[in-house]
Image (tube, helix red, strand yellow):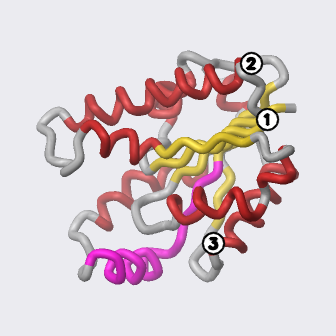
Amino acid sequence: MRKVIFISAPSGAGKTTVRKTLDETIASNFNNNIFKIEIDAMYKEINPNFRAKNHLEIWKKARENTGHLIKEKLDEGTEAIFVVGNTIFSDQRMQEVLKPIQAEDGVEFIHITLAPTRSELARRLKKRRGSVPKWIDSHLAEREPYLEAKWTNVIDNSKMTPEQTVTAIYEVIKYGRTMKSFFEDE
């Protein structure tokens, strides 16, 4: 069965590193027929400095375009599509991505949330940026209600290496819950 795996997390949680590690760790489990999409990179192509006045509209377009790209890759027969991004944590935002796809026969949808602790996230962001950004608490607060969503699988990767995080992701792909309830609740 083909799979679309969404990996959502705030900045600093390790999304980009995980995306880069997938080829070396679990691609062979999908006959090396995987495709990776980073929504944040799509957004950055449109708005490189993250300063556009219409940034919410740009994020929405990036999510919608991601959905079309997923559909195209599924039609080509890609076995596993990994979609990583920091804005795919809520029902509404997931709907924007899934609109062109919806529930396809022979495709399993899995949503994973990487959720390191606040202190670990602050440490990683400080290392990357030189200081802890002011927005850290608001970013975590807007995601918190969705940590309990029945269509996501939460991984606390605070103490994990990127390879260990990818291994945990693969365990979720094999044994975790799918997004079936997401489609049933529509």
Amino acid under disc 1 = Glu
Left or right, residue 62 beside residue 161: left
* Residue 71 numbered tag: none
Separation (CA) of disc 2 from disc 1 = 13 Å
Determine whether 47 is above or below 97 in the image. below
Q: Which residue is mark 3?
A: 162
SS for dot 3: helix
Q: Position of residue 98 (x, y in %)?
A: 57, 25
Q: Nearer the viewer, residue 157 or 152?
A: 157
State yes or no: residue 123 in magenta.
Answer: yes
What residue is drawn where x is 15% and y is 47%? 51
SS for dot 2: loop
SS for dot 1: loop
Q: Earlier in the sequence, mark 2 or mark 1?
A: 1
Dominant secondary-structure state across the stretch colored magenta: helix
Q: Position of residue 170 (x, y in %)?
A: 79, 57
Residue lying at the far left of the rendered structure? 53
Q: Are marks 1 and 3 in contact (CB under 8 Å)?
A: no
Camera-side mark, 3 or 2: 3
Q: Earlier in the sequence, mark 3 or mark 2?
A: 2
Q: Which residue is mark 2?
A: 104
Q: Residues within 10 Å of mark 3 (few under 14, many from 20)?
A: many
State yes or no: residue 8 in magenta.
Answer: no
Determine whether 12 is above or below 142 in the image. below
Amino acid under disc 3 = Pro
Q: Is residue 151 visible?
A: no
Q: Which residue is mark 1?
A: 79
Which quadrant is home to the N terminus? top right
Q: Position of residue 20 (x, y in %)?
A: 59, 60
Q: Residues within 10 Å of mark 2 (few under 14, many from 20)?
A: few
- What is the magenta range? 112-129
Q: Position of residue 31 (x, y in %)?
A: 86, 44
